[in-house]
Image (cartoon, rainbow, N blue to C red):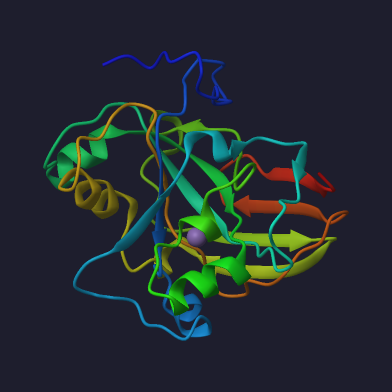
Amino acid sequence: MQWNSPTHPALITTTGETRFVNRVFCIAKNYEEHAREMGAEVDRETPFHFQKSFDSVVFGPEVRYPRQTSNLHHEVELVAVLGSGGDNLSLAEAEAAIYGYAVGIDFPRRDRQAEAKDKGRPWEIGKSFDDAAVLGVVTPKSVIGLLTEGAITLEVNSTLRQQGNLSQMAYQTVELVAFLSRLQTLKPGDLVYTGTPAGVAAVSAGDAFRAEIAGLEPLQFSLVSA
Ligand code: MN
């Protein structure tokens, strides 16, 4: 399986290695408090996910406010980057498939997502669009180890908006990779956005973002008018 796919965005890595984004899997409702603030609960039986297009991925330093929404929300998330893939991975195989980690922001058009939920439609209109998935610098797992705990925070215009700990995730990265591998063949360059802690709220063009996860490179960017 190759990393190379010239039409796909190239990841930024701490080692300078060239890796390309393949698919973007996003886990919903993986932190109890966030599920609650959305009027839902974590499903302890099975995770719940959706996909964004690979070309939703953007690295900054400028991220465009999307059209077709007046309620763009921020969701700071740990992103697991796969270096290999496979089907029906065991937990040990899933761990081995993780190449590294980065800080990411999942931007939903919350108004469009709410409409979709009301109509019993897929979330795609609310979740997959230009610049909908911001991705920071990838640190290899060989450097940082398996991430299962550590502070995760988001500041917007220097004000703390989201604060949590990776240990609050209902499903850890290894379980999520194993889960996804039961549904389709996973491949190098697949990203897994692992869900957000509580505190999601609306943002505006002109806002400045700083997202941090203990041990990873901070993610900083500005939201700009398209
Ligand atoms: Mn999310």
Q: How many marks?
A: 0
- Specify whether 203 is left or right of 168: right
Q: Quadrant for residue 72, please give it.
A: bottom right
The residue depicted at 47 percent of the width and 22 percent of the height is: 20
Where does the C terminus fall, quadrant-wise? top right
Q: Residue at x 41, y 64 (%)?
A: 28
In the rendered image of this protein, does residue 221 appear above or below residue 204?
above
Q: Is residue 29 left or right of residue 204?
A: left
Instruction: Please state if 150 lies on the left or on the right of 74 as rendered.
Output: left
Task: List the single residue furthest toward the front.
Answer: 119
Residue 97, quarter of picture: top left
Image location of residue 187, percent across then percent down: 28, 29
Q: Quadrant of residue 80?
A: top left
User: Taking the image as drawn, is residue 215 in sight?
Assistant: no
Most extreme residue toward the right is 206
- Picture residue at 54% right of the left edge, 19% below the top: 15
* 141 displayed left or right of 160: left
Identify whether 57 is placed above or below 35. Answer: above
Is residue 87 positioned above or below 50 on the image? above
Q: Residue at x 34, y 77 (%)?
A: 42
Where does the N terminus fall, quadrant-wise? top left
Where residue 35 appears, x then y in whole percent?
44, 78
Query: Does residue 161 show up?
Result: yes
Residue 53, horizontal then vertical, whole percent: 47, 40
**Residue nearest the observer in this picture, 97 or 202:** 202
Residue 109 in percent (x, y) is at 62, 62
